Amino acid sequence: MAAGLRRVTPDHISQAALVRELDEALQIPGVANAWTMPIKARTSMLTTGMRTAVGLKITAPTLETIDAIGARIEAVLPDVRGTRSVFAERTGGGYFLDIDWKREELARFGLSMDEAQSIVQNAIGGENVTTTIEGRARYPVNVRYMPDFRSEIGDLGRLLVPAAGGQRQVPLAQLATIGTATGPSMVRNEDGLLTGYVYIDPRRP
Protein backbone atom coordinates (compact mmCIF):
# COMPACT_ATOMS: atom_id res chain seq x y z
CA MET A 1 0.00 0.00 0.00
CA ALA A 2 1.33 3.44 -0.90
CA ALA A 3 2.57 5.41 2.09
CA GLY A 4 0.13 8.26 1.44
CA LEU A 5 -2.85 5.89 1.53
CA ARG A 6 -1.93 4.00 4.68
CA ARG A 7 -4.12 4.29 7.74
CA VAL A 8 -3.03 6.57 10.54
CA THR A 9 -3.64 3.75 13.04
CA PRO A 10 -1.43 0.64 12.98
CA ASP A 11 -2.36 -2.19 10.61
CA HIS A 12 -2.14 -4.70 13.45
CA ILE A 13 -3.06 -4.52 17.11
CA SER A 14 -2.15 -6.83 19.97
CA GLN A 15 -4.44 -9.60 21.07
CA ALA A 16 -5.05 -7.85 24.41
CA ALA A 17 -6.10 -4.65 22.63
CA LEU A 18 -8.39 -6.60 20.33
CA VAL A 19 -10.04 -8.31 23.30
CA ARG A 20 -10.57 -4.94 24.98
CA GLU A 21 -12.27 -3.58 21.87
CA LEU A 22 -14.47 -6.67 21.61
CA ASP A 23 -15.46 -6.43 25.28
CA GLU A 24 -16.36 -2.77 24.85
CA ALA A 25 -18.46 -3.53 21.79
CA LEU A 26 -20.32 -6.56 23.15
CA GLN A 27 -21.72 -6.91 26.66
CA ILE A 28 -24.73 -9.20 27.22
CA PRO A 29 -26.27 -9.34 30.72
CA GLY A 30 -25.77 -12.75 32.33
CA VAL A 31 -23.15 -13.85 29.78
CA ALA A 32 -19.37 -13.71 30.21
CA ASN A 33 -17.17 -13.12 27.16
CA ALA A 34 -14.48 -15.72 26.47
CA TRP A 35 -12.45 -14.85 23.38
CA THR A 36 -10.23 -17.47 21.80
CA MET A 37 -9.28 -18.90 18.42
CA PRO A 38 -12.31 -20.64 16.81
CA ILE A 39 -10.49 -23.83 15.81
CA LYS A 40 -8.78 -24.10 19.20
CA ALA A 41 -12.10 -23.58 20.99
CA ARG A 42 -13.79 -26.24 18.89
CA THR A 43 -10.99 -28.76 19.50
CA SER A 44 -11.00 -28.12 23.24
CA MET A 45 -14.77 -28.40 23.41
CA LEU A 46 -14.78 -31.74 21.58
CA THR A 47 -12.04 -33.03 23.88
CA THR A 48 -13.22 -31.81 27.28
CA GLY A 49 -16.73 -30.43 26.82
CA MET A 50 -15.53 -26.99 27.97
CA ARG A 51 -16.10 -23.91 25.83
CA THR A 52 -13.22 -22.03 27.46
CA ALA A 53 -9.50 -22.64 27.83
CA VAL A 54 -9.86 -23.39 31.54
CA GLY A 55 -12.86 -24.78 33.39
CA LEU A 56 -14.07 -26.70 36.39
CA LYS A 57 -16.43 -29.64 36.60
CA ILE A 58 -18.51 -29.89 39.74
CA THR A 59 -20.07 -33.22 40.69
CA ALA A 60 -22.59 -33.54 43.51
CA PRO A 61 -25.63 -35.64 44.45
CA THR A 62 -28.12 -32.78 43.81
CA LEU A 63 -28.44 -29.93 41.33
CA GLU A 64 -28.98 -27.45 44.18
CA THR A 65 -25.56 -28.33 45.62
CA ILE A 66 -23.93 -27.89 42.21
CA ASP A 67 -25.55 -24.46 41.79
CA ALA A 68 -24.44 -23.37 45.26
CA ILE A 69 -20.82 -24.44 44.74
CA GLY A 70 -20.75 -22.88 41.27
CA ALA A 71 -22.04 -19.55 42.62
CA ARG A 72 -19.34 -19.51 45.31
CA ILE A 73 -16.61 -20.25 42.76
CA GLU A 74 -18.00 -17.55 40.46
CA ALA A 75 -17.78 -15.03 43.30
CA VAL A 76 -14.25 -15.95 44.43
CA LEU A 77 -12.28 -16.63 41.23
CA PRO A 78 -12.49 -13.13 39.67
CA ASP A 79 -10.17 -11.93 42.46
CA VAL A 80 -7.49 -14.43 41.40
CA ARG A 81 -4.75 -12.78 39.35
CA GLY A 82 -4.88 -13.73 35.69
CA THR A 83 -8.63 -14.37 35.59
CA ARG A 84 -10.56 -12.28 33.10
CA SER A 85 -14.07 -13.72 33.51
CA VAL A 86 -15.85 -16.58 35.28
CA PHE A 87 -19.27 -18.00 34.49
CA ALA A 88 -20.98 -20.85 36.37
CA GLU A 89 -23.85 -22.68 34.72
CA ARG A 90 -27.24 -22.32 36.40
CA THR A 91 -28.62 -25.82 36.03
CA GLY A 92 -31.84 -25.19 37.94
CA GLY A 93 -32.98 -21.96 36.29
CA GLY A 94 -35.56 -23.31 33.86
CA TYR A 95 -39.20 -22.21 33.77
CA PHE A 96 -41.80 -24.56 32.37
CA LEU A 97 -45.50 -24.71 31.61
CA ASP A 98 -46.97 -27.49 33.74
CA ILE A 99 -50.21 -29.18 32.64
CA ASP A 100 -51.56 -31.64 35.22
CA TRP A 101 -54.28 -33.71 33.57
CA LYS A 102 -57.44 -34.65 35.42
CA ARG A 103 -57.79 -38.28 34.45
CA GLU A 104 -61.39 -38.53 35.68
CA GLU A 105 -62.41 -35.69 33.35
CA LEU A 106 -60.53 -37.22 30.43
CA ALA A 107 -62.34 -40.51 31.02
CA ARG A 108 -65.71 -38.74 31.29
CA PHE A 109 -65.26 -37.22 27.83
CA GLY A 110 -63.74 -40.36 26.34
CA LEU A 111 -60.32 -38.85 25.75
CA SER A 112 -57.12 -40.81 26.03
CA MET A 113 -53.96 -39.27 27.46
CA ASP A 114 -52.30 -39.50 24.06
CA GLU A 115 -55.14 -37.58 22.38
CA ALA A 116 -55.10 -34.85 25.02
CA GLN A 117 -51.32 -34.46 24.87
CA SER A 118 -51.44 -34.33 21.08
CA ILE A 119 -53.94 -31.46 21.12
CA VAL A 120 -51.80 -29.43 23.51
CA GLN A 121 -48.66 -30.15 21.53
CA ASN A 122 -50.21 -29.07 18.24
CA ALA A 123 -52.11 -26.03 19.54
CA ILE A 124 -49.33 -24.58 21.71
CA GLY A 125 -46.10 -26.05 20.36
CA GLY A 126 -47.23 -26.27 16.75
CA GLU A 127 -46.96 -28.92 14.09
CA ASN A 128 -45.18 -28.85 10.74
CA VAL A 129 -47.87 -29.58 8.13
CA THR A 130 -45.91 -29.02 4.92
CA THR A 131 -42.76 -27.52 3.43
CA THR A 132 -42.52 -24.61 1.01
CA ILE A 133 -39.92 -24.65 -1.73
CA GLU A 134 -38.37 -21.35 -2.77
CA GLY A 135 -35.59 -22.01 -5.23
CA ARG A 136 -33.10 -24.23 -3.44
CA ALA A 137 -34.37 -23.26 0.02
CA ARG A 138 -36.86 -25.35 2.02
CA TYR A 139 -39.00 -23.80 4.78
CA PRO A 140 -41.31 -25.79 7.08
CA VAL A 141 -44.84 -24.45 7.57
CA ASN A 142 -45.84 -24.66 11.24
CA VAL A 143 -49.48 -24.36 12.31
CA ARG A 144 -50.50 -23.43 15.86
CA TYR A 145 -52.67 -20.97 17.77
CA MET A 146 -51.87 -17.28 17.44
CA PRO A 147 -49.93 -15.72 20.36
CA ASP A 148 -53.07 -13.90 21.55
CA PHE A 149 -54.64 -17.28 22.35
CA ARG A 150 -51.65 -18.84 24.16
CA SER A 151 -49.61 -16.06 25.76
CA GLU A 152 -51.31 -16.22 29.20
CA ILE A 153 -52.29 -19.13 31.42
CA GLY A 154 -55.90 -17.91 31.38
CA ASP A 155 -55.85 -17.94 27.59
CA LEU A 156 -54.50 -21.49 27.56
CA GLY A 157 -57.36 -22.60 29.81
CA ARG A 158 -59.82 -21.50 27.12
CA LEU A 159 -58.25 -23.64 24.41
CA LEU A 160 -60.85 -26.07 23.08
CA VAL A 161 -60.13 -29.78 23.00
CA PRO A 162 -62.30 -31.81 20.60
CA ALA A 163 -64.07 -34.79 22.18
CA ALA A 164 -66.66 -37.37 21.12
CA GLY A 165 -65.25 -37.56 17.63
CA GLY A 166 -65.23 -33.79 17.23
CA GLN A 167 -68.88 -33.35 18.21
CA ARG A 168 -67.96 -31.55 21.48
CA GLN A 169 -65.40 -28.90 22.38
CA VAL A 170 -64.13 -28.98 25.97
CA PRO A 171 -62.05 -26.11 27.47
CA LEU A 172 -58.57 -27.19 28.49
CA ALA A 173 -59.09 -25.76 31.99
CA GLN A 174 -61.84 -28.34 32.53
CA LEU A 175 -59.50 -31.19 31.67
CA ALA A 176 -56.30 -30.08 33.39
CA THR A 177 -54.76 -27.79 35.97
CA ILE A 178 -52.42 -25.33 34.23
CA GLY A 179 -49.55 -23.62 36.01
CA THR A 180 -45.85 -22.85 35.87
CA ALA A 181 -42.99 -24.77 37.42
CA THR A 182 -39.26 -24.33 37.87
CA GLY A 183 -36.69 -27.03 37.28
CA PRO A 184 -33.38 -27.83 35.62
CA SER A 185 -33.06 -26.38 32.16
CA MET A 186 -30.37 -28.96 31.38
CA VAL A 187 -28.98 -31.92 33.33
CA ARG A 188 -25.40 -33.04 32.74
CA ASN A 189 -24.43 -36.56 33.66
CA GLU A 190 -20.85 -37.80 33.61
CA ASP A 191 -19.87 -41.24 34.88
CA GLY A 192 -23.28 -41.56 36.52
CA LEU A 193 -22.86 -38.33 38.52
CA LEU A 194 -24.72 -35.03 38.20
CA THR A 195 -22.26 -32.47 36.84
CA GLY A 196 -22.10 -28.70 36.43
CA TYR A 197 -19.53 -26.60 34.56
CA VAL A 198 -17.74 -23.41 35.54
CA TYR A 199 -16.19 -21.61 32.56
CA ILE A 200 -13.02 -19.60 33.22
CA ASP A 201 -11.41 -17.25 30.74
CA PRO A 202 -7.78 -16.59 31.75
CA ARG A 203 -6.03 -13.38 30.80
CA ARG A 204 -3.31 -13.99 28.23
CA PRO A 205 0.17 -12.72 29.06
Image (cartoon, rainbow, N blue to C red):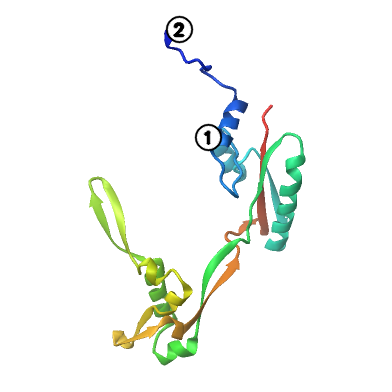
Q: Mark 1 or mark 2: which is in front?
A: 2
In the image, is residue 39 above or below residue 77?
above
Relative to the observer, which residue lies in front, 42 or 177? 177
Tag 2 residue: 3
Residue name at image x 74 percent, y 43 percent: 77
* Residue 135 at x, y percent in the picture: 22, 46
* Residue 194 at x, y percent in the picture: 67, 59
- Can residue 114 be seen by looking at this rendering? yes
Q: Which image quarter holds the C terminus?
A: top right
Where on the picture, by quarter, is residue 83? top right
- Looking at the image, residue 18 sits to the left or right of residue 75; the answer is left
In the image, is residue 191 above or below residue 172?
above
Residue name at image x 60 percent, y 31 percent: 20
Q: Which image quarter holds the N terminus?
A: top left
Tag 1 residue: 38
Looking at the rendered structure, the kind of residue marked 2 is Ala
Relative to the observer, which residue lies in front, 59 or 172? 172
